[in-house]
Image (spheres, grey):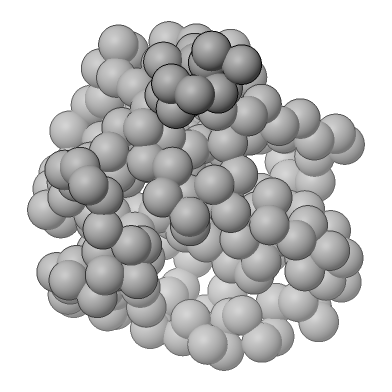
Amino acid sequence: MYQYSTYDSVYHGQYEGGITLEELKPYGGFGLGTFDALEGELVAFGDHFYHCVDGRCTPATMASKLAWAAVCHFNEDDRIILEKRAYDDFKNNVLRLCDFAQRLVAIELQGMFEHITLTSTKKQKKPYPSIETIIEEAIHFPHSSVDGVAVGWFAPACFGGIKSPGFHFHFVDRTKNVGGHVVDFSGFSGQMRLCYPKGFRVDFYNKACQDTPDNIKKA
């Protein structure tokens, strides 16, 4: 599994893109992320990449820059059929069912969602607001009877500030027109595919020193 930047970096205001989608692509065609200045959500599966803004989905351009991303080459290790699962029920029971509470896991949910609520962040302007403000102001997009794919990760608490602990999903519907960050869902029926990455690499945002205060540059 490859990750560009960290959960803590974004949480503390590092919203600038530092890697292009073209540069990210060799590390895997499955995963998620966010674009430069938090302009929407990245969803990747089947080696296709999508850009979701304001609840809508379009193919992502390879020149787009990303502020954060986590991808892998998805090799299926397990598959489970689920019926009528809500998000809270899913989170509470899948951990016990699959015994991966201390594992980093790539997860694909493919099937019908009776209800799903999505959101996406808009492009931010400097001075950047806090992530809490951005989340509070984000618009929610509820949908009913939607067939599609939720792409996500589970990270245990031991990953600390590197990855957001718990579950994190992005979604694209079957028509590739609707997508975003998953806030909640209910009535999911379909298949859950799991991949257990055997390694973990992180590259950090490392912009040139033009962002460094002048007194430090001179020193």
Q: Is residue 167 left or right of residue 115?
A: right
Report the number of numbered marks: 0
In the image, what residue occupies the spot 17% across and 71% down? 137
Task: Give whichever of 89, 155 is nearer the camera.
Answer: 155
Rendered view: 54 above or below 86 = above
The C terminus, quarter of image: top right
**Residue 142 appears left or right of 116:** left
Q: Judge from the rendering whether residue 29 lies leftward or rightward of residue 76; answer left or right.
A: left
* x 81%, y 82%: residue: 96
Q: Residue at x 26, y 58 (%)?
A: 129
157 to the left or right of 162: right
* Residue 154 in view in this figure: no
Residue 163 x/y as whole percent: 65, 53
Q: Residue at x 58, y 74 (%)?
A: 82
* Residue 30 pos. (x, y %): 54, 34
The picture quadrant where one finds residue 184 is: bottom left
Position in image of residue 155 (x %, y %): 71, 60
Which one is in front, 106 or 81? Answer: 106
Q: Quadrant of the N terminus?
A: top right
Specify whether residue 187 is in view: yes
Please tell me whether residue 116 is drawn above or below residue 69 in the rendered image: below
Above or below residue 7? Residue 160 is: below
Residue 42 placement: quadrant = top left
Q: In this orientation, which residue lies closer to the viewer: 14 or 186?
A: 14
